[in-house]
Amino acid sequence: MKGYDLFELAVRNLRQSKLRNGLTTVGISVGVASLVAMLSLGVGLQQLATRRLAGSGMFDTVFVTSKQDFRGFDREQDQKDQHPENAPVLDEAARDKMAHLKYVTEVEPEIRVMGEIMYGGQTHFGFVTGLPMSARENEAFDNLQGKFFSRSDADEVILLNDFAKELDPANPKALIGQPVTLRYGEHQPLAADSDTSGRLSGEQSDGGSPNAGDSYGFSVVRKTQQLKVMGIIDEEPYGGMRTVSRGRIFLPVDLTAKLNMAEFSDMRSSLRGHGRTYMTLTVRVKDPAKVAQVQDAIKQMGFRTFSVLDATKSLRRFFTVLDLFLGIFGSLALAVATLAIINTLVMAVLERRREIGVMKAIGASDGDVKRLFFAEAGAMGFFGGVLGIVLGFAIGKAINIGTGIYLHNHQLPAEAVWIMPPWLIGAAIAFSIVVSLLAGLYPASRAARLDPVQTLKYE
């Protein structure tokens, strides 16, 4: 039997019992719709999480710390590092070496110190952090009120909206373009011949002489700096996931270096005799796909690294399990539809015994009968799959609209939590056809085993 004749005969047979076959097809479509809706929801949630992380500018960033300062996330690796005190420190030489690595675009320190802003005769405390010029690409600055820094060392400042409201509760936007005064502590190294009379009697420096100057010592001197308010942001940059995010006063990172601000890590560095070191360096990579390669190069230098890609390994594992469970629950309705297909085709075999007997009497083989019932099952699967895609798409749109309304009522931006990837359309239809063909195995085999003599005699 030719393929065209087989298809035409299958469609004709399906039309003979429109109500029963139609209900079976609708059952398949409901199963496919539930499967598509569940899997698309999982894809949408995963892409939402990925968008938020990508928008925070974290995917192309590697965080570098010294093994002397922090324990890592890998306990096995920590156990191997039995002498972290001998590990290299994050100083300017290490920063320069990282800056010359392949695919690295910038290496900036994470600077966060306590400072004071004086405005209108009042003093307000807040953490001061340094931002690189590349921070302008971060989503936190999409709704920036005012302008970004003009240069990486300009005497300018950007304020967090909450802090701006403290400075000017009546009209925070009026601060833009206004001068403010920053009071901070400046790190000043001690001179080699500095007075050591402040030591206790008999106390010696590392050099052994009680009057020898300590080249690693420093003093903190209170300084002030006039700044111009360039802009105000509503939320913390980098999604609050970096040290520099947890600040209220943002300066250009080169300005913080020029002001030589005293940092929390200075005392630690002085006690260890390292001079000034960095607590954390952030390494920006040209291509997120090269982050792992850059991490390996930095690890070979003896430093500890962390990137969002390390965290997303667990995130991807979570969404894989989530997609699995959503697919299982979504397939339950399709399993019910499978039983409906079997029931429909078994009833068709009983009703069409004479037709099958005539077909075999005029030369149809058992294989032709099987293919006929397979074609009918496949046709129901195809049309049910197409209808299921349409129904699932409608369900997804309703989910997105409902979620958007809910977020809007809570003063949050709308987000698409349901996304149907193109591959899922073809996969759902193909899966529907395969399931339908499997459901048609028993009815097709039963029809092929009918004896034409007995069927005609029965009629």
Image: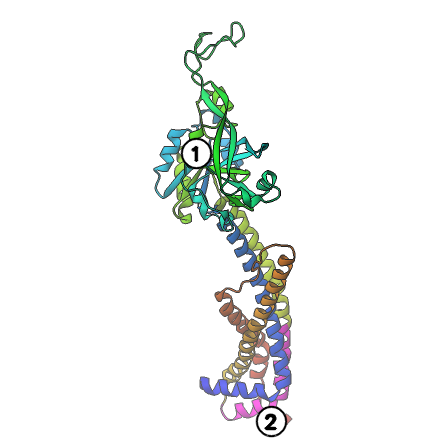
Q: Is residue 458 above or below residue 217?
A: below
Viewer-nearest residue: 313 or 239: 239
Q: Is residue 68 above or below residue 14?
A: above
What residue is at 48 percent from the left and 25 percent from the top? Answer: 186
Badge 1: how crowded within 10 Å, few (<14), some, or many (20+)?
A: some
Quarter of the image where the C terminus is located: bottom right
- N-term mark: 2 or 1: 1
Which stretch did the figure color magenta?
337-363
Whole-angstrom CA distance, mark 2 to mark 1, is 97 Å
In the image, residue 349 lies at what x, y percent?
Answer: 61, 85
What residue is at 43 percent from the left and 9 percent from the top? Answer: 212
In the image, residue 405 lies at what x, y percent?
Answer: 63, 61
For this view, does 98 lie left or right of residue 389?
left
Q: Given the image, on which type of amino acid does mark 1 rest?
A: Leu
Per the picture, the main secondary structure of the magenta-coloured stretch is helix
What residue is at 50 percent from the left and 93 percent from the top? Answer: 362
- Please say whether residue 361 is one of the residues in the magenta stretch: yes
Viewer-nearest residue: 26 or 269: 269
Report which quarter residue 303 is drawn in: top left
Give the foreground label among 2 and 1.
Answer: 1
Mark 1 lies on a secondary structure that is helix
Q: Given the image, on which type of amino acid does mark 2 rest?
A: Leu
In the image, residue 453 lies at what x, y percent?
Answer: 58, 92
Mark 2 lies on a secondary structure that is helix
In the image, residue 279 lies at what x, y percent?
Answer: 48, 31
**What residue does disc 1 label?**
255
Badge 2: how crowded within 10 Å, few (<14), some, or many (20+)?
A: some
Which label sits on residue 456?
2
Residues at badges 2 and 1 in contact (C-beta under 8 Å)?
Answer: no
Residue 338 visible somewhere in the drawing: no
Viewer-nearest residue: 357 or 296: 296
